[in-house]
Image (cartoon, grey):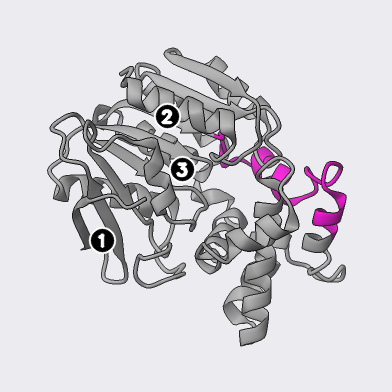
Amino acid sequence: MNYKSTKTEYLEVSKTHKIYYEVCGNSETEPILFVHGGPGAGFSEHDKRFFNFNKQKVVFFDQRGASKSIPFGSIRENTTQDLVNDINKLLDYLKIDKIILFGGSWGTTLGLVYAIQNADRIKGMLLRGIFLGNKTSIEHYLNGGVKNDFPKIWERFSKNVPKENQLSIPEYYLHKMINGSKQERKHFSYEWAFYEISIFKKNITKKEVENILNQIPYESLSIMESHYLSNNCFIEENYIFDNITKIENIPIKIVHGKEDAICPSKFAIELNEKLMKSDLFITEGGHSDSEIEIEQKLIEIINKNVW
């Protein structure tokens, strides 16, 4: 389905980076900012299905190095704080004072860090698939936390790293994606993305995984994820929980899949318990926002405008 954009443009956010963004919808209502996952996944036309552009104004943007942003896949000047600063530059440029922030997966990490630093600009938040960016979350994803449920996928992912290697898995993959031969760069980018997509949705088939990878800019996803996860997401350990009081007055809705293999539901439960004005919806499904119950709940909440 095609949606009319009221504005499509690049915004220069540094001497190195220009970020791509779209503003969809003509409503005068409080705008929604869509914060994509990854890091590095970018937003897609499919993400627009959550919204009613007759009633809502939504800002979509590709974070530094992701998808249509320039330069593609660049990790230079690319940290969480850079991305937080970019959001402010984008909102200032668009003359937007306050937003409802809608983020999924890595978008919840970035969204929460942004809100902690800019609580006055957030009217409310809708978060899906909570990823806290701390060592526990990263260890689960990259150091065997999914090994018991997906042994074959874990073996395929981990066997690309030689046992005698001294680097961590994300460091080794990143090294090959940045410094390897053309064939190695392609191979390690594909294998990283294949691992994630293989476990992000319940009962997904290998053919479905391959079809998805043919449709997304997986190179930026793989490079950016390995870059961020090699550096503990460029935030202090437990930064979100240590600063949770700064967002305690923000209404927050959390949607999380019961069978999420990438971000176990215990992380969403823990976050919800620490917040003052949050509602948690645990639904059937994994990590993908295309799971039926997760998708329906997100559409229901964002279109009710409960904020």
Along the horizontal axis of the image, is 124 left or right of 134? Answer: left
Q: Residue tagged by mark 2?
A: 299
> Which numbered mark, 2 or 3, is in the foreground of this view?
2
- Whether residue 103 is visible, yes or no, is yes
2 or 3: tag closer to the N-terminus: 3
Q: Nearer the viewer, residue 261 or 176?
A: 261
1 or 3: tag closer to the N-terminus: 1
The type of residue carrying mark 1 is Val
The type of residue carrying mark 2 is Ile
* Residue drawn where x is 27% and y is 65% of the image: 14
Q: Nearer the viewer, residue 288 or 66?
A: 288
- Whether residue 35 is visible, yes or no, is no
Q: CA distance from mark 1 to mark 2?
A: 31 Å
Residue that protrudes farthest toward the top in the picture: 276
Image: magenta residue range: 129-155
* Residue drawn where x is 22% and y is 31% of the image: 55
Q: How many numbered marks does the figure carry?
A: 3
The reply to whether the magenta stretch includes residue 24 is no
Determine contact: label 1, label 3, CB under 8 Å: no
Q: Is residue 229 above or below residue 52?
A: below
Q: Residue tagged by mark 3?
A: 107
Which x, y percent locates residue 176?
66, 76
Q: CA distance from mark 1 to mark 3?
A: 19 Å
> Which numbered mark, 1 or 3, is in the foreground of this view?
3
Q: Is residue 29 above or below residue 249?
A: below
Q: Residue tagged by mark 1?
A: 13
Along the horizontal axis of the image, is 211 left or right of 163? Answer: left
Determine contact: label 1, label 2, CB under 8 Å: no
1 or 2: tag closer to the N-terminus: 1
- SS class, disc 1: loop
Along the horizontal axis of the image, is 42 left or right of 97? Answer: right
Q: Is residue 81 above or below residue 273?
A: below
